Image: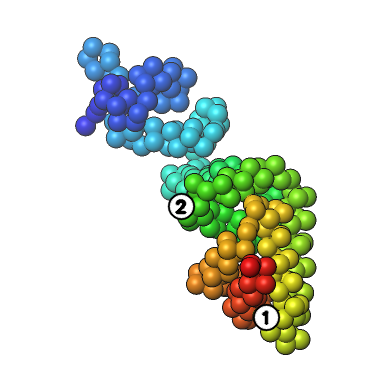
Amino acid sequence: MSYSVGQVAGFAGVTVRTLHHYDDIGLLAPGERSHAGHRRYSDADLDRLQQILFYRELGFPLEEVAALLDDPAADPRAHLRRQHELLTARIEKLRKMAVAVEQAMEARKMGINLTPEERFEVFGDKDPEQYAEEAEERWGGTDAYAESQRRAAGYTKDDWKRMQAEVADWSERYSGLMAAGEPPASEAAMDMAEEHRRHICGWFYECPYDMHRSLGGMYVSDERFRAFYDSMRPGLAEHLRAAIDANAARHTP
């Protein structure tokens, strides 16, 4: 069975002009001609065209494609294996690129003006957008959310590193406070809770005591936040919530 140049162009998603060009340069000469001299393509021609288009999609120049396909020592199965390996590698590269672009888009959305590489360097395995969608749903229309977005948009990599260093220092000191047996309502624990609130005020948005109490409740009720704080020291989320409540009480008439 043979096919016209128009049919093959439709099958392969190329133009008739492209097929004519492949014929003119000897890359894909149709195996048959009709009585009127029109090109007719066999199944073997379609197989060769498929090989050509695979290599072209991978960026090979036409001259190199011709050399690869016309190598008398080449096994057709070897061509397929080679193309499969190349396509698989390209797919993986494109997948990684897509992930990087998605991360960059999310960073822009959240106002974190860092490259994906910088964000991994700063945050490690903690994704700063992990709660982005939920945060926007909960607080998207609030002044606090808008203020947090505005501030974060201007932070540099060094700003984020300094913020992370403050968190790490606070975490170490709070863990030490718990190890020393300080109860949540102690002066030391309440002072640490106040420092926690001021960190939020300084870096993100004004956090009055009633809002801080709400956050403390979320640190316990939301398993993800609980896991984050308890990773600093087991039980820290619950201890901090109680310290936040005690601190709010001492500052609220």
- Numbered disc in front, either 2 or 1: 1
Q: Which residue is mark 2?
A: 137
Residue labelled with disc 1: 185
The residue shown at (24%, 28%) is 2
- Tell me where residue 241 sits by quadrant: bottom right
Residue 189 point in image, percent of width and height: 72, 77
Q: Secondary structure at mark 2?
A: helix
- Quadrant of residue 109 in the image? top right
Crowding at dot 2, Cα within 10 Å, few <14 / some 14-19 / many 20+, comes out as few
- Residue 46 in view here: yes
Q: Nearer the viewer, residue 132 or 217?
A: 217
Residue drawn at the location 43% of the way across and 18% of the way down: 21
Q: In the displayed structure, would residue 13 be above or below residue 150?
A: above
Residue lying farthest to the bottom in this orientation: 181
Q: Nearer the viewer, residue 175 or 252?
A: 252
Q: Position of residue 36 (x, y in %)?
A: 23, 12
In the depicted view, which residue is nearer to us: 70 or 177? 177
Amino acid type of the residue tagged 2 in the rendering: Glu
Residue 77 x, y percent position in the rendering: 43, 48
Q: Name the kind of residue labelled 1 in the image.
A: Ala
